[in-house]
Amino acid sequence: MADTTWAVGIDVGGTFTDAVAVRADGLVRTAKVPSTPDDPARGLLDAMAALTLAGVTPGAVTRVVHGTTVATNALLTGSLTRVVLCATDGFRDVLAIRDGQRPAMYDLFQPRPRELVVRRDRLVVQERIAGDGTILVPLAAAEIERVVAAVRRRRPAAVAISLLFSFIEPAHERALGEALRRALPEVPVVISSEVAREFREYPRTATTVIAAGLGPVVGRYLDRAAAGVAALGVPGSLLIMESGGGLVVADRAAREPHRLLLSGPAGGVGGAIEIGQRLGLTDLLTLDMGGTSVDVCLVRGGHAPRRATQAHDGVPVLAPALDIATAGAGGGSVAWLDPAGALRVGPRSAGADPGPAAYGRGGTEPTITDAHLITGGLDESTPLAGSVRMDRSAAEGAIATLAGPLGLSLEETARGILAIATAHIAGAIRRVSIERGIDPRGLPLVAFGGAGPLLAPTLMRDLRLAEVVVPPTPGLLSAAGLVGADLRFDESQTLLLRFGSRDEDRLLAWLRTAAADLERRLSAEGVAPGNRRLAAVVDCRYLGQGYELSVPVPAISRRAVRELPQAFHRAHREAYGHDAPDEPVEAVTARLVAIGVLPHAEPARVARGARGGRPDAAADLGLRTLVAVSRQERVRARLWRRDDLRAGDRLIGPAIVEQLDATTIIPTGMVGRVGAWGEIRIREART
Amino acid sequence: MTRTEAGAERRRLASARPRRGGSPADGLDPVTFALLEAALRATSVEMGAALRHASYSPIIREMLDYSCAVFDAAGQLVAQGEFIPAQLGAMSLVVQATLRRHGPSIAPGDVFVSNDPYEGGAHTPDVNVIRPVFVARGAPRGGPPALLGWVGTVAHQVDFGGPNPGTEGADNRQVFGEGLILPPVRLATARGPQADLVALIGANVRDPVSTLADLRAQLAACRIGEARLLEIAEHHGPATVRRAFAALLDHAERRTRAALAALPDGEAEAEGFLDDDGAGGPPTRFQARLTKTGDRLTVDLSGSAGQVPGGLNNPWASTRACVAYLVRAVAGSDIPANDGALRPVTIVCPEGSILHPRRPAAVSVRHLTCQRLADTMIRAAARLWPDLPVAGHFVGFFSLMAEGPSPRTGRSVVLQDVVGGGTGAHGPRRLHAQGTAGPGGGPGGMTMPGGDGLDAVDTHMSNVGLLSAEVCELEYPWRLVRSELVPGSAGRGRWSGGLGLRRTYEVLAAAQPVVLYCEQTDPRWRPWGAAGGGDGRPTRLIVRDPAGRRIVVASKATVILEPGSTVTIVTGGGGGYGDPRVAGS
């Protein structure tokens, strides 16, 4: 009997909500519906309903994987729940003091950084634990009572507890946390030793407060989403994409919402890695250009690099995240004139509502999408995502507000907007490559998101990249990446122990305990032992250094732990060109990752086209005038319908390829070739 | 009034100016120019990351007291990342001193080290490690390698010898008491590190393991800088890189001139004081007179006091960095940070001034002077340009240094912490013509609202981080007992100053020599309010013995403290702006 179960990925973006369903036999169904920023869960359920109309049986859906920007938006717009913070006496202001540095060094007019918790909501606790874990000031029962009463008086929506040295000795945080949970059962209480067992009080406290402040917002949303999905008759569980590119079940995600801040972009990176694997490309750049922003990531050896900490609006968050750079140059990013009359683009976006002027929803500001409409990359005759009709005269009106003061024609202004947007994206690519010491030249660029394939070839030329790979459904790649993702759980613990002493036992014991815990979690999610992967790294440094290098532990064994210092010397030599084999090495933080591999279907291949690469006549939609971004040039570009292209077809630039979810431009001098799975690989034409 | 030294500086800057005015990028197409600008800046940032990550001392790795930069063959700064202002451009004088001293003998593989305040250095703990970058002469001529430029790092070493832990101390009377002095000498050659010199340094410092590791980290950063610069040269060709160096300097000059031209002409002055002369004597006076004419600015500091007996003297490199800070704060920080930005600026300051001392004046706590000098110049600028509506920052710059056994290894370690305070509030202003936050109200001026100051930050010339309480207690025999904001410490106003900080440290083990210094303890020199706003509070320093009895100490002191003793610093808040009876918005 054929397996007819479905796995569904739903990516809620700023403008559209995308859904991809893959049946066990490789059949794919997709849907794209407008996002509903006022209530993102509605967009999610709309997408699920649209999939049902497309033939997906809700009762046969085994998992719904969701990428969400709810946490990010709540943090960036300052709509966190009001948090009361309990801190060690003397340290209530850790969040306000930050790291003691001013964000801008030469700006005498810089604004005060936003306060996550106002001072009257920062309460002190009489207790103190020393750096070696001994208790200097015990947390008395009477003090717990006093703090509970003080918290109650503040009527918080959530409570964060962050006490000094709790990563070594969590007893006080736990005692206070339990008392608060008992006394205020309706109020979520987050303690730092549960969300981040790492040293340095400022990042740990910031992470705890952000987790507490996001909890109710994200929890409410995920509850509604899970209930809605269940109400549609879906028996499978709702899984959420985390910033680090792995999945967790929804209720766990709601308890660790600080791990979702890059949930949105992570799916697309996974999707791009999958395509790369199919094509034999292990080192590549990913470019995800949606309505509000552009995200880029540099993949090496088939893996996206991860960071243990991220900064959001200058605030550190201790949670694994893909190393992604963002530029404010999405389709909806607004073009404007600065006080000196210079043309600027972004980072502000017109979003989904009202959206670009061309959407005809009341937007009047010129955006990147409007510029594409003027230059011919997009056209009135082809609705965006098959549903949004575009109004060229509205776009012209909006661009004219810039063209007038600039003294340029509409076309010149639109070209300028696209050139500046391209430069912004190139800057983001440099941040993940050149600034990490990696030369981007010669790398392939996987371009996706509805707007990615419009500008990617220009970027390829500017940055001397090898080629642009346009996935079969670029506008849906993030959702497809969600379907392709696996469960990923991790644990970390700051240990601060020296090698060559009995301390090694502590490291081994922690690794064994954490491995058992993670195995249990995978088992609880129904992952068979054969589908479980464990990987450990230990962040090591020379005793006296302050920054660590992550050294992989090949096995959880005494021998592997003993050999860590040698591996660290090697890693230090590679990273900095020198090592100090006689210096003692210490293990600072141990990190363990457990991956639960989910069943994934093979995508279907497209039919082969005619010999010689000439596309079928059915794909030929005629000619359209196109203004090139890189030079003042109007050309007649051949217009192709993507759905009718076949493997082996050659598309000679200038050409435009249209499909429901995206538009691809192949500029003059480039050639696109359609691959086995329907992907288009664009390269410079050989001369 | 003697202007000779400043004249020399002026001549140097003038002679360094390229002869051709040329196009915006001197024959470079704008894209190549932008690419090289970004690549050179990225090189300095990457060097900084390597230095930070491989270093041992918290003052480097946690508090970020270091800078990295790229120089042309003549030692002019062409690109520097956003490091701390006190080190902005200072290293170029070290590269130039090295060129003067070693000239033709400089060879591929050489790495120079220097901390001499009288050869371009700032103070002896700021150790410069610089490396010349050579390119092979292109075919067909062949020939010896040609000097393309330099890469360099300066890092505040936590101890570089001398009687005081941390090397600094206001009571030093001569630079000879400020640790090991290294004029520009080779730390390494193509054959490898100079083992004799490394041994000499190791024998002169309190924590040789950390210091030598930090020097290795500086060497590693220079090696990375060299590799990147060579890659850039390989990609674009050395000739293009040299053209880009010149174009970058010209570009910064043009941007600065345009920003200055947009400001009203005029002259204004301000005075400022240090609490004493560093040796328990009377207050030390500074005077800054700014004259702006067309696209040029003259900063006349010649009314300031002569050099003082204590370690408050400010070497020329530091005075120059203060002026670079002023220019950047006024003209816009989006102007590339390089020596071109100082070309339209003349600094007048005679030798023998506290701001231009002669050897062997002591200089180790010169940062207190830097802070007050920046404050005084900003005050003069605010009088000269009404669209620079700012109140005074806390400039007391408290620093604590101590030597004791590490709780983790038992070996001697040196703690240093630096504590900031509140910045001044600012009033509403018109935007600069270029759209940057400067004082020159251009046409069409958009008005920006005023704002409160920042709480508890390092101010003006410094931007070092605050030591984490957990890091402090794990690595040093010291405990932070509290670290919190001080309500009421700032000047009230329609916009209020930022708050100061109260920090209490407790000695945990061994009787330790402790160096303390701070400024603005004299209420007369507290952070100034503006336009009717109130003043911030002065700094207070309280030291107690293990029994809790107060030990009377001056604002700059070296004391031996027993375990159980505490040091409490209460820093000032910033000045307020505008009448406090009108509510802020």
Image (tube, coloured by chain):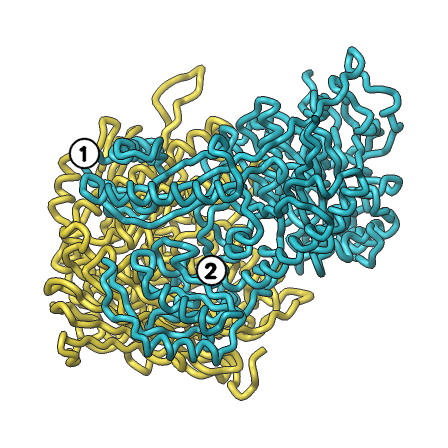
In percent of width and height, residue A315 lies at 48, 58
Whether tag 1 and tag 2 are in contact, CB under 8 A, the answer is: no
- Residue B75: quadrant of the picture: top left
Amino acid found under the numbered disc labelled 1: Gln
Q: Which residue is pictured at 71% across the width and 25% down the height?
A: A604
Q: Which residue is pictured at 63% across the width and 46% down the height?
A: A66
Q: Using the image, determine if residue B424 lies above or below residue B120.
A: below
Helix, strand or loop at label 2? It is loop
The residue indicated by pointer 2 is: A103
Is residue B547 at all visible to an observer of this figure? yes
Q: Using the image, determine if residue A536 lies above or below residue B516.
A: above
* Callout 2: chain: A
Q: Colour of chain B?
A: yellow
In percent of width and height, residue A629 lies at 73, 37
Q: Colour of chain A?
A: cyan
In percent of width and height, residue A416 lies at 72, 44
